[in-house]
Image (tube, grey):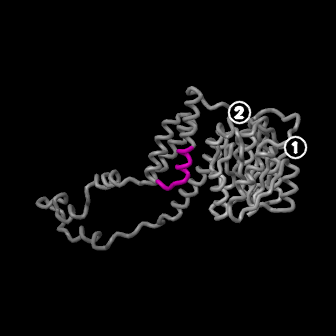
Amino acid sequence: MLVLVVDDELLTRMTHMVMLSHMPDVNAIGAGSVAEAKLVIAHHTPQLVLLDLELPDGTGLDVMNFLTQRELQVGLVIISAHLGTFRSKLRPNDRLHLLNKPLNKNDLQRVVKDVQLGTSHPSPFSLTDYIQLACMGQHTAVIECLSNDACGEVVIDKGVVWSAQDELGQGAEAFHRLLLAEGALLRVGAERVPKGPRSLFESWEALIFESMRLKDEAVRDQRRTKRGSNSPTTTPTPAAPTLAAPTLAAPPSADHPPATTPAATSTKPPLTEPTAQASTNPDPDADFDTCVESGVRAVLARDFAGAIAKFERAHALRPKESMVIHRLERLRLLQAQRAMNGGSDLPA
C-alpha cells in the first residue's frame, strides 16, 4: 500500500515516514507542498494520504480538492496540533481520520491497518468534509456544488460559514439543500473578493447538525409511508359461527330480556376491553417516533438536557438505531461545550 505524507516540516515528514516503514506491505513517499503533492498523486495513486492543514503554497484543502477532481478512492488522515478544539465536534467519517500532533505511532498504525484490511471504505469527499476542514483550519474558501438536485455554492470566510445560495434561494435553506444533495460534484476556489453579503449566522456545527436532522426526518417519513403501504387494505370477515350465534337465541320477551340472554353476553366483549389491551401493549414504533420528535423540538429550543432524555428513551426502545446513537453523541458533546462556555450557547 502506498501512503503519501504531505507536511512542510522536513523532520516531521521524515518521522512519519519512518513510522510507516516499520509496517509490513507499506511504502511511504513524502511531499512538502501542495505542488509536490499534486505531482506525486499525478504519477502514483496513493491509498492513504497523511495531510497537514497548513502548507507553504496553499492548504490541505487544495490537496483534497485535487484528489476529488481525479476521483481517487483514498483515505485521508488530517494531522494537526490544533485538533483539540475541533476533533470532538467532527462527525465520524469513513473518509477522514483525525490525529493530533505529535503523532502517536499506535494511532497511525491502527488507521493504516483499517485501510489495508478494508474495514474503512474511502469514497469521494463530500461537501460536509470540505466545510469541516475549512472551518477547522480557519480557511477562506468558495465551495461550488453541482448535482442533479442542487446547484450553488457555500462561502467560508476565515473559518466562518458566511453564505450559501442555490437556484432556489439563499441562506440556511440553500445550505441544507446543497449539503444533502446526492452525488454532487464539488470544486473549491481560492479567496474571492468581495465575498458578498452574509446569509448564514449559525455556527458550522449547528448548520451541519440541522442538515442531518432534516435527513433523518426524511428517512423516518419514508419508513412511515412504507409501513402504511404495507398495511392491509381490507378488513378480514369475522368467522360465520360468531355472526350466526345471536340468531339462535330465543326471541325477546318479558321473561327473557336481551340483556340477560346467554348467547348475547357470550358474543359481546366489554366495551373497555380494547382500550385496556392498547394500554398494556403500546405501539413501540409510535412511542419511538414520539420520543425522536420531542427530542428534535428540544434541540431547536437548545434544551440539550431535555433532548438527551428523549433520545435516551428512543435508544432504549431501539438500541441499534444508528441515527439515535449519533444524536446522543452529538448532543452530549454540545452540552459539554456549552458548559465550557459558562452555560451560553455555542459561538456562531
Mark identifier at residue 57: 1
Rendering quarter of residue 203 = top right
User: Would you place residue 43 above or below residue 291 in this image?
Assistant: below
Q: Residues within 10 Å of mark 1 (few under 14, many from 20)?
A: few
Amino acid type for the residue under numbered disc 1 = Asp
> How many circles with numbers are drawn on the protein?
2
**Residue 34: percent from the left, percent from the top?**
85, 48
**Residue 85: percent from the left, percent from the top?**
65, 37
Q: Main secondary structure of the magenta part?
A: helix
Amino acid type for the residue under numbered disc 2 = Phe
Task: Assess whether residue 336 is covered by the magenta stretch.
Answer: no
- Magenta span of residues: 319-329
Residue at figure coordinates x 59%, y 28% from the top left: 341
| Quarter occupied by the C terminus | top right
Q: Nearer the viewer, residue 28 or 332?
A: 28
**Residue 324: percent from the left, percent from the top?**
53, 49
Q: Nearer the viewer, residue 147 or 188?
A: 188
- Cα separation, mark 1 vs mark 2, equals 30 Å
Residue 6: tell me if it is visible. yes
Mark 2, secondary structure of its residue:
loop
Q: Residues within 10 Å of mark 2 (few under 14, many from 20)?
A: some
- Mark 1 or mark 2, whichever is nearer to me: 1
Q: Nearer the viewer, residue 49 or 291?
A: 49
Q: What residue sits right under mark 2 in the picture?
A: 201
